[in-house]
Image: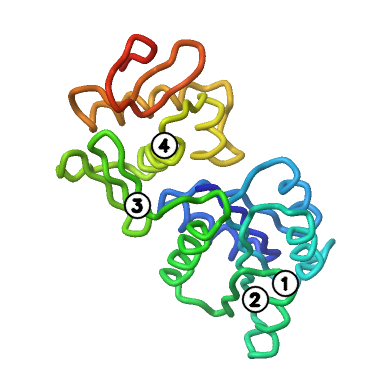
Amino acid sequence: MRILVVEDSRALADGIAEGLRDQGMAVDIAYDGREAAAKLDLNPYQVVVLDRDLPGLHGDTLCRMIADSGNSAMVLMLTAAGTPGDRVTGLSLGADDYLPKPFHFPELVLRIRALARRQPAARSRIYRAAGIELDTLRHTAARDGRPLNLSAREFAVLESLMRAHPAVLSAEDLLEQAWDEHADPFSNVVPVTVGRLRRKLGEPPVIGTVPNVGYRIMDDPDPGATGL
């Protein structure tokens, strides 16, 4: 799950991002509205956590731009203006949810995950394939009933593969979906993480490599996709 946090308070933005990354989310940060608009043009996000009172480009204007552009990202307004009238105004601008400051961080996480499930491209909160069951709300995964002890990054990679099943995701796709903008595109983090995930999933191999294409969840091993 890839999130954009738009907040001009650097301490708050960095704190939110750190907490969300601990929850297995890939998080980018923009400290003003213009920087956020540029990142929205470059990257696909499932949820935008948006402060209203932004320098450069006001949050209300940015929210309208997201809604009018047909961008599939869901918008969670996060602002100190928390009266019922402010909430009505924010939602009328195209926001999908509204959370006033100060907020309880676990509630923020739950609201983000709920919005991600409502995103037009999203299918379900629970994904099942090849004996794997992954619950994005409870952040749990199991294979054949055996709980999997996954790191936040391993969970994010498995979630991306389960969402795409039975399609193939390239290493670039996984880097874009499970890491943030600071990931080095020339590093080997994707194959290393996939390798650790394969070991934790156990035998028989369930993540196949399609040569020169990428990775996919295999229902049954076949000549076109190996676990190597």
Report the disc number at residue 157.
4
Which residue is at 62% across, 58% downward? 48
* The one of 218 and 151 positioned closer to us in this rendering: 218
Q: Is residue 167 left or right of residue 195?
A: right
Q: How is the image coloured?
A: rainbow
Mark 3 or mark 4: name the one nearer the start of the chain: 3
Which residue is at 78% across, 54% downward? 69
Residue under circle 3? 126
Report the disc number at residue 79.
2
Q: Secondary structure at mark 2?
A: strand
Q: Work out whether 163 lies above or below 185.
A: below
Q: Work out whether 84 lies above or below 102.
A: below
The residue under label 2 is which amino acid type?
Thr
Q: Is residue 183 left or right of residue 152?
A: right
Contact flag, marks 3 and 4 (Cβ < 8 Å): no
Q: Position of residue 109 (x, y in %)?
A: 45, 64
Contact flag, marks 4 and 1 (Cβ < 8 Å): no
Q: Secondary structure at mark 1?
A: loop
Q: Position of residue 28 (x, y in %)?
A: 61, 49
Look at the image and tell me in which quarter the C terminus lies: top left
The mark closer to the camera, 3 or 2, is 3
The residue under label 4 is which amino acid type?
Val
The residue under label 1 is which amino acid type?
Arg
